[in-house]
Image (cartoon, grey):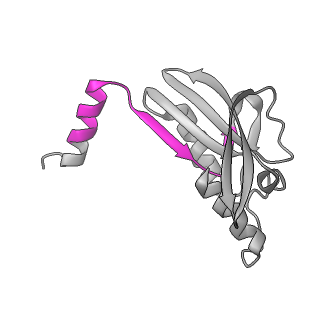
Amino acid sequence: GPPSRRCDEVRRERSLGSPHVLVAAIEHTIPERKVKVNAGGLGKVLDQMLREHPPGELSLVHPMCGDADYGPLDEYKKLTVVVDGRDHEVEVFTMQSMCGDIQRTWYLLRHPFFTEQGKKAPYPSPMTKLSVLRYFSLWNQC
């Protein structure tokens, strides 16, 4: 049958210019820095997307894990986020790379809530703790 309207919209967008996609995920990969923060399938999906995304721009937002070596990063900005009635400062760093026709820009967030987590266990636990609620409040606002 005829292509759906959604497919037509995507084709029209691509014909007007390259798409810009924003991805925010706790799990992440930065191939150039040999950083892999992975707890399951999402990290593998993101790794594949970094290589196979259509030409365009990818902006990737991730919390920094304490045991990952991100190498040199550019300071981007500081965010002030309110969690549990208190201001928290989050440092944002950035780096860029190209992979074929994909411009990749990482925005990496540093805060003690994030750096307490590790590459193999990036999600806070147990889910019943107040500290987990604070972690996700900070993450979702960033």
Residue 16 x %, y %:
27, 25
* Residue at the limit of the structure toward the bottom, as seen here: 128
Residue 101 x %, y %:
48, 21
Residue at image point 48% right, 29% down = 57
Q: Is residue 126 above or below residue 31?
A: below
Q: Quadrant of residue 41?
A: bottom right
Asked if residue 10 lies in the magenta stretch, the reply is yes
Q: Using residue 114 as the reference point, say whether residue 105 is left or right of it.
A: left
User: How many numbered badges does the structure rendering display?
Assistant: 0
Residue at image point 64% right, 62% down = 137
Residue at image point 73% right, 79% down = 128
Q: Is residue 42 visible?
A: yes
Q: In the image shown, does 106 or 99 lie closer to the viewer?
A: 106
Residue 13 x %, y %:
28, 33
Q: In the image shown, does 11 or 20 lie closer to the viewer?
A: 20
Which residues, given as a range, are shown in magenta?
Answer: 8-29
Q: Using residue 3 as the reference point, say whether residue 74 is left or right of it.
A: right
* Residue at the limit of the structure toward the right, as seen here: 67
Q: Is residue 54 above or below residue 100?
A: below
Asked if residue 16 lies in the magenta stretch, the reply is yes
Q: In the image shown, does 33 or 111 lie closer to the viewer?
A: 111
Q: Is residue 71 above or below residue 139?
A: above
Q: Quadrant of residue 116?
A: bottom right
Residue 46 x %, y %:
58, 44
* Residue at the limit of the structure toward the left, as seen here: 2
Q: Is residue 27 visible?
A: no
